Structures are given as C-alpha cells and as structure tokens.
Amino acid sequence: MSPDKVIKRRRRGTSLTAAPPPRTANRIFYAVAEGRVTEYDYLTMLQNAYAASCSFRIDMPSPSSRTDDMTPLRIAEHALAVADDDAKRRHGQYEEIWAIFDRDEHIDVLEAFKVVRGHPKIKIAFSHPSFDFWLLLHFRSFNVPQNGNNDDVHTRLAACPGFNGFGKVEKKITGPRAKELLPQIGTAVRNAKALSRHCDEGRCTHGRGHRQFCGHLEQDPSTGMWRLLESLGITQLLT
C-alpha cells in the first residue's frame, strides 16, 4: 500500500481536529463530559462549525486529563470545582458550565443532579441511555425504552450514513461523520424536544405510562443536548 493511502486510511479513523477558536468571543462556556472521545469530538465539531458565527468558545478538560471512568457524580463534582475556581475571578469567565453525562448503568445519576441543583451557572445535558442516542436523533426519531442498554441504539446508528461500525470498534466522530451530522442538527433538536415536550404536557412517549412529570430515570429514551445548543445560539441559526 502506498504511503498516501496509509495516511488517508489513518485520517478516516481519527477524531476531528479542533480549529483555533475565535480570538474574542462574546460568551465563554465550559463543558465536561463522561466520555473520553465521542462527546468531546462532538463539541469540537460544534466549535469548528459555529463558534465564529455565534461568538462563543467552549473550554474543555485537556485530552490528557480525560478518562474512561468518569461517573455522573464525578462529572458533577468536576463542574462544581470549575465553578468554584471561576467564582474567584473578577466577574467570572464562564457564562455557563455544562456537565454532560449518560444513564448507562450508573447508580449515581440522581446524586449528580442533586449536588449541582440550584447552582446559577451549572447546567446538565443528560442522555438516556447514552450520548449516542443524541447522535441517532440526527437521523431518525426513536422512543423505545432501552433501560440503560446501548445495543439497540448502536445497531440503528451503525445503519446511518457514515456510522458503519460505530460502537463496536471505535466511537470517534471523524470528518466524514461530522459532514453527515451537521446538516441534521435541526432534526436532532426537533426529535429531542418532542420527547421532552410530551412529558411536560402529560403525554409521555417513553413507554412507561402517562406520567405528567417524568423523573430523570423515567425519561427513557431522552437527551438534553438540545438545551446546550440553544445556549450556544446554534438553534437560532437553524430556524
């Protein structure tokens, strides 16, 4: 195989490279995620595509500090530590601090929500069963309960354009995958908001009966990633 072909093959399997953020941004956010790769790739995609037009910057933990053993509670505690450090700055640097975590099979989800409840700057983007469900909503709606299991989500996502093999060997968002996701962000927002709206209206579509106010663990499947995109100003560009 020629060196050029080897390089191209490696590039297809690598995560997105972060473009330099705007020198000045009207709003600076911080985001910490449970996953080590996928969530940060997605945030990088958003920053590369929208930071300049929406005038924001997303700060994240350095790649070397990201681990695979971050639980929802550890994510919430990390967000609190960042908020405490930020409060020591004059006027503070961050407009919002986002904790991004999943249901999976974690036992500390509700505790994570509890420790940051009421904090003026910390927001949560919670996905049930996983962040990968948010990726799936870019291509199709889906409202079958998963009980924290990702197998069905990965099977359906692997059938979407550009995502063959996702979840089995690797979970990176590469350049080609980003090209498939970006035009479908509006679809993902609409699909995710529909699930949340039906719960609030007492027309729950999560398959657990008609609960007027679904708890976080009952909202299966669901994702709050659309709220982060609203805060960033991205959804306003899509309407």
Image (spheres, helix red, strand yellow):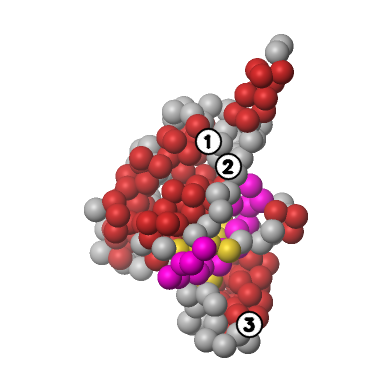
Image quadrant in which the N terminus is located: top right
Residue 140, x across and y down, in percent: 36, 38
* Residue type indicated by callout 2: Leu
- Work out which residue is located at the far front of the displayed protein and give it: 23
Q: Which residue is mark 3?
A: 84
Q: Few, some or many C-alpha atoms within 10 Å of disc 2 (few <14, some 14-19, many ≥20)?
A: many
Discs 1, 2 touching: Cβ within 8 Å: yes
Side (left or right) of 187 relative to 51: left
Q: Is residue 77 above or below residue 33?
A: below
Q: At x 38% / y 37%, what residue is drawn?
A: 139
Residue 135, x across and y down, in percent: 46, 43
Q: Is residue 162 above or below residue 65?
A: above
Which numbered marker is on residue 16?
2
Query: Is 61 in the magenta?
Result: no
Q: At x 75% / y 55%, what residue is drawn?
A: 64
Discs 2, 3 touching: Cβ within 8 Å: no
Nearest to the observer: residue 223 or residue 55 = 55
